[in-house]
């Protein structure tokens, strides 16, 4: 899979940002399961005992996107 900026839809970016905020704040906002599953296929998210979380690769990918790494929607 290509994992450049174009590999993620706007909804998948939003979901990845939500997962990052969940990790940072502990606030459990709902995420679209289909988008989270796509992120998991790309290696950017995983599902564990605490629900969906970003992987290190997902967090790194957010940091590489100019201008909106962890901004609110």
Image (tube, rainbow, N blue to C red):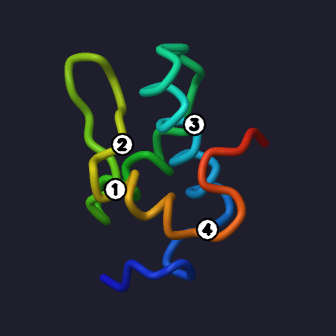
> Residues at badges 2 and 1 in contact (C-beta under 8 Å)?
yes
Q: Which mark is residue 44?
A: 1
**Image depth: mark 4 or mark 2 in front:** 2
Q: CA distance from mark 2 to mark 1?
A: 6 Å
Instruction: Give how far across and how far down residue 2 sits, in percent.
Output: 36, 85
Mark 1 or mark 2, which is nearer the start of the sequence?
1
Residue at 57% over, 36% down: 18
Q: CA distance from mark 3 to mark 1?
A: 12 Å
Q: CA distance from mark 3 to mark 4?
A: 14 Å
- Left or right: where 48 falls relative to 44: left
- Taking the view exactly as shown, the residue that stands out farthest to the left is 49
Q: Which quarter of the rendered picture does the N terminus lie within?
A: bottom left
How many neighbours does mark 4 have within 10 angstroms: few (below 14), some (14-19), or many (20 or more)?
A: few
Residue at 50% over, 51% down: 35
Q: For this rendering, which residue is in front, 73 or 1?
A: 73
Label 4 belongs to which residue? 9
Q: Which quarter of the rendered picture does the C terminus lie within?
A: top right
> Residues at badges 3 and 2 in contact (C-beta under 8 Å)?
no
């Amino acid at each position: 899979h290509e994992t450049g900026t174009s590999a993620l839809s706007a909804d998948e970016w939003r979901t990845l940002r939500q997962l990052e905020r969940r990790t940072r704040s502990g606030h459990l906002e709902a995420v679209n399961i289909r988008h989270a599953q796509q992120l998991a296929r790309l290696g950017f998210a995983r599902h564990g005992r605490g629900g969906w979380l970003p992987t290190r690769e997902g967090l790194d990918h957010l940091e590489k996107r100019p201008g909106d790494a962890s901004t609110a929607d």
